[in-house]
Image: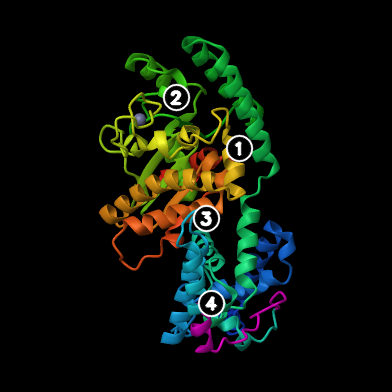
């Protein structure tokens, strides 16, 4: 009996040791062949190809480049940090100067001279540097047997999606020469630009939800406030029934255009119901919260909701601005919107920036507010004040004239962007915010040249702390669904951490 028991115990011990050994051997083989990194790189490349089918073999090069980045790679065999010598730094600085000069306003009398001066500087600086020809790190998927020391050993085995996006954002700003000096293949900045542009294109569900939202907005306009409220509630309940499992959800997020308290009470709704009293809004809050039986409903301010779309890390500090018919703002500190006790945080649209007696009026009825000048409506009012411009000029005309580089339109948008850029500089100097995301219909229609005008204005208004504002300001996708996506991300990713 005792003998049998001994045999069983010995057998169990041997099996345990054996399975431990097998696990160890598998881990060692996996590490030796860098299998985890290779798998991650292949998955990332495949994702890039799905997002932008035109990217082709560069998807692998881009994935390898990002995962080998010394900042992210957790491998023992890292690439060396990029240290640029003085001449290379001078060359890159000269190239940026030239870019800034070409982006000066067309009616700026010093523009031509600044361009020719910067061009001369670029040429002189270029003569002193040798630009290496950087070969792509990888052009095909990694295989099981692909030799690890041909690059796979440097690949990271884990990375956050937000970090990938940040690297892509940085890369798209580079010139081909700058990329090569940083040991990045020269084609990658253009591929990064293509990828980000593809990410910003609308997919089918986004287009469909946009149509539904338009219907809701159109219906809401027909009725008086009390009826509007009923229509609004009916419409969102109905939308829920059509998309969900018979209207059943775990959680529902509502992005509301007006200040909302931390507890989800609507405090004011000027853009929807005009000036209605607190009681009506409190009732509306409760009706929205109980619109779906046994479902948790969270009401967020719409700009707060959009902010969650752009949050790249759970502890990030940044600021989001919406530039549409009005201006909205929200500062996120440590990944949380800074709303204050009363819920009124993030109303920079009503900061007075023009103190002249005939300053333009804002939606709220007062004069000279940022929202009355830097928004789409504000810029249009600025244009209509020009003696040479007919009073019938439309927003579309203004945007088109801006893209055609017509001096009057460039100067109007320059003024609008100027007042917003200066507010960004104030926020940066007060709170050291490193990142500003601007979204909204007007900002989206004006696009990249507008973003650079904002950066110039912020740079000019800010203490020279060595920050490159053209990298600190980003445009969000021009798709009208930032609030939807952000509210979804809030419920799915961030709410649990609270
Ligand atoms: Zn105002």
Q: Mark 1 or mark 4: name the one nearer the start of the chain.
A: 4
Q: Is residue 296 above or below residue 479?
A: above
Q: Mark 2 or mark 1: name the one nearer the start of the chain.
A: 2
Which residue matches tag 2? Answer: 271
Judged from the image, the secondary structure of the residue bearing numbered disc 2 is helix
Tell me the mark number nearer the camera, choosing from 1 and 4: 1
Quarter holding residue 302: top left
Q: Mark 1 or mark 3: name the one nearer the start of the chain.
A: 3
Q: Are marks 4 and 3 in contact (CB under 8 Å)?
A: no
Q: Are marks 2 and 4 in contact (CB under 8 Å)?
A: no
**x and y, in percent, of residue 345 in the image:** 31, 38
Which residue matches tag 3? Answer: 106
Tell me the mark number nearer the camera, choosing from 2 and 3: 3
Q: Is residue 310 above or below residue 43?
A: above
Residue at image coords 49%, 34%: 387
Which residue matches tag 1? Answer: 397
Res 25 seen here: no
Ligand 1, by image quadrant, is top left
Q: What kind of secondary structure does the magenta stretch mostly adopt?
A: loop
Tell me the mark number nearer the camera, choosing from 4 and 3: 3
Judged from the image, the secondary structure of the residue bearing numbered disc 1 is helix
Tell me the mark number nearer the camera, choosing from 2 and 1: 1
Q: Tell me: 14 left or right of 45.
A: left
> Label for residue 178?
4
- How many C-alpha atoms fall within 10 Å of the one at disc 4: few (<14), some, or many (≥20)? many
Is 32 part of what is drawn in magenta? no
């Amino acid at each position: 009996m005792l003998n049998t028991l001994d045999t069983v115990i010995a057998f169990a011990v041997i099996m345990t040791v054996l399975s431990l050994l097998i696990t160890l051997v598998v881990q060692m083989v996996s590490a030796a062949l860098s299998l985890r990194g290779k798998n991650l790189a292949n998955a990332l490349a495949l994702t890039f190809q799905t997002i932008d089918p035109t990217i082709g073999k560069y998807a692998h090069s881009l994935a390898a480049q990002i995962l080998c980045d010394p900042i992210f790679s957790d491998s023992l065999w890292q690439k060396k940090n990029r240290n640029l010598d003085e001449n290379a730094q001078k060359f890159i600085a000269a190239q940026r100067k030239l870019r800034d000069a070409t982006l000066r306003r067309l009616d700026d009398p010093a523009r031509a001279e600044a361009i020719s001066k910067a061009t001369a500087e670029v040429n002189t600086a270029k003569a002193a540097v040798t630009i290496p020809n950087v070969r792509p790190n990888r052009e095909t998927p990694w295989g099981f047997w692909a030799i690890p020391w041909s690059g796979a050993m440097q690949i990271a085995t884990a990375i956050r999606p937000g970090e990938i996006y940040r690297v892509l954002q940085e890369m798209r700003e580079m010139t081909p020469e700058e990329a090569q000096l940083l040991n990045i293949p020269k084609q990658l900045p253009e591929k990064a630009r293509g990828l980000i542009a593809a990410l910003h294109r609308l997919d089918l569900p986004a287009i469909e939800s946009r149509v539904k939202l338009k219907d809701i907005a159109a219906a809401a306009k027909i009725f008086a406030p009390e009826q509007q409220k009923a229509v609004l509630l009916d419409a969102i309940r109905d939308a829920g029934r059509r998309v969900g499992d018979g209207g059943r959800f775990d959680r529902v997020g509502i992005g509301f255009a007006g200040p909302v308290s931390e507890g989800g009470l609507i405090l004011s709704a000027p853009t929807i119901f005009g000036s209605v009293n607190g009681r009506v809004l409190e009732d509306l809050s409760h009706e929205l919260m109980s619109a779906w039986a046994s479902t948790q409903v969270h009401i967020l301010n719409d700009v707060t909701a959009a902010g969650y779309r752009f949050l790249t890390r759970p502890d990030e500090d940044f600021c989001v601005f919406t530039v549409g018919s009005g201006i909205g703002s929200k500062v996120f500190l440590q990944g949380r919107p800074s709303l204050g006790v009363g819920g009124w945080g993030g109303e920079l649209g009503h900061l007075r920036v023009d103190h002249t007696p005939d300053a333009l009026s804002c939606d709220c009825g007062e004069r000279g507010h940022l929202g009355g000048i830097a928004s789409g409506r504000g810029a249009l009012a600025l244009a209509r004040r020009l003696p040479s411009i007919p009073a019938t000029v439309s927003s579309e005309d203004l945007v088109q004239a801006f893209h055609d580089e017509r001096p009057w339109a460039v100067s109007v948008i320059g003024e609008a962007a100027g007042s917003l850029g200066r507010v960004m500089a104030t926020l940066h100097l007060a709170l050291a915010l490193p990142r500003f995301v601007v979204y909204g219909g007007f900002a989206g229609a004006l696009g990249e040249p507008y973003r650079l005008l904002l950066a110039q204005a912020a740079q000019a208004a800010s203490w020279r702390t060595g920050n490159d504002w053209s990298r600190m300001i980003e445009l969000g996708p021009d798709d009208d669904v930032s609030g939807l996506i952000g509210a979804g991300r809030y419920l799915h990713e961030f709410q649990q951490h609270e």
